[in-house]
Image (tube, rainbow, N blue to C red):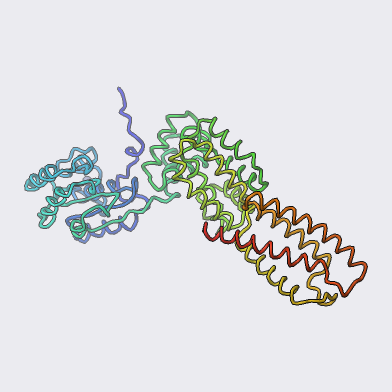
Amino acid sequence: MTVKYQILARQYRPQTFNEVISQKSIVTTIKNAISQNKVASAYMFSGSRGTGKTTLARLFAKALNCKSPINQEPCNKCSSCLEISSSRSLDVIEIDGASNRGIDDIRQINDTIGYAPANRYKIYIIDEVHMLTKEAFNALLKTLEEPPNNIKFFFATTEANKVLPTILSRCQRFELKRISHEDIINKLRQISNDLNRDIEDAALHIIANFSEGSLRDAESLLDQMFCFKEGKILLDHINESIGFVSKDYFFKLDEAIKNVDINFAFYFIDNIYKAGKDLSYLIEELIEHFRNILVVKLKDSSLLETFDEEKKKYENSASYYSEEMLFYILDLLIKNIQNNHKSIHKKINLEMLLLNIIKSKKRISIDILVKRLIDLENKANTSTNENIPNKETSPIEPKKQVEVNKKEEIQLSSITQNKNIEESIKEEKKIKLEKIEFSLSEKNKKTDSPISISPIQTINVARHDTIMKFMQVELNAIIKKG
Ligand SMILES: [Zn+2]
């Protein structure tokens, strides 16, 4: 005898309200409506895919028609319950709004409404109700306006905004939440235990992440993994099966950014490319990675939906970045999603993007630029107010001045990156010249000449003007980009 295989999502579909996860308040409302005999004639279950809309509608139908319900729960033993469970009930009619969307389909419903149900109620469950045509909606509306007492309508939709307001206003609405990460993991673990299958914690977490709050998606993926591999399911098996990039690559990327290791961009993309991974969704995976680091940076790692070992890795990575740098990288990635999907040269496109990310460590932040501008302005004011140099009023000690000049050289060379080459060369020459003049002035200092104007101050003013000019250009560019 062959045993008919049932997919996990179906095999483990809740048979009672108590088994429904993440939708407690809706379950309570439904049970109260039944016990207080206040069941409305139409309900709208809306929410994203795999959150249990039709499951709840079916349970509701079962509970209403059950011959011996226990605390508003269906017994799952009576003829009505068994018929509904096996989709043989003549009282509970399920219609897929996506494939029966025309006016004729709705007319058929209207035609059958007159026939009395075998049990208490005749219940129409219309899935994806937003797909109905306008004419079909209008035909449905007529029935909804004055429904017979023994008729109930349960609608399910992923896009309630596309349902006519006149229909919505005649329904009690239930907004289903996405299933929480924890609930999905618990359910998957329960299924795995039940089937005597062993699965690594990290693997369960990645399945839960991938399914984005859809229990059905999570169960389908688990199903796929059980078919893909015998024995214990590991994180690597999932990465291999779905084509995910191993997270180790992303943590290595953090190291590369920390060390400004440009070569890693080519190594990273090349490895992923050769492993046959899908480059289309790499940016989304990168966004997820940097978003997690930002969460750790702004809040703490307990908010991450992952296992402890990985949380530690994120904490470590977070120490490499400033908040601003993370915002910059995320912004860059988000702006490139569209480009990457359209690009026929995904590999090159991604390499360039990664190069920019790795180089972002050297980027001067706007806060630092503004601070430097203010510092320089103050310094210039102090210098130009003095005509005669004096040891007591000299704004900066010579030793400190050397340090300041060194810093300015570093920032100046960074700023000049954005200028055209010709100007950069001119500036470089100027800096070198100033450097020489500065060392000369240091020598002059020793030959004590209080009346002559110090060359340091002449240089200061000249350098300041140059830096101010570049700062303005840099600031304008950043402001425009922002
Ligand atoms: Zn029953």
Classify residue 414 as left or right of residue 456. Answer: left
Q: Which residue: 42% across, 47% down?
A: 212
Q: Which residue: 28% across, 59% down?
A: 29
Residue 280 drawn above or below residue 457: above
The spot of residue 188 in percent (x, y) is: 43, 42
Residue 451 drawn above or below residue 64: below
Give the quadrant of the N terminus: top left
Classify residue 38 as left or right of residue 300. Answer: left
Residue 342 drawn above or below residue 74: above
Determine the residue located farthest toward the top in the rendered image: 1
Q: Which residue: 78% across, 54% down?
A: 432
Classify residue 67 as left or right of residue 428. Answer: left
The spot of residue 217 in percent (x, y) is: 38, 41
Q: In which quarter of the image is residue 96?
A: top left
Count of marks, rendered view: 0
Residue 170 drawn above or below residue 222: below
Along the viewing direction, whichever of 11 and 137 lies nearer the viewer: 137
Classify residue 458 as left or right of residue 186. Answer: right
The spot of residue 127 in percent (x, y) is: 24, 45
Along the viewing direction, whichever of 437 and 76 lies nearer the viewer: 437
The spot of residue 470 in percent (x, y) is: 64, 60
Q: Is residue 198 visible?
A: no
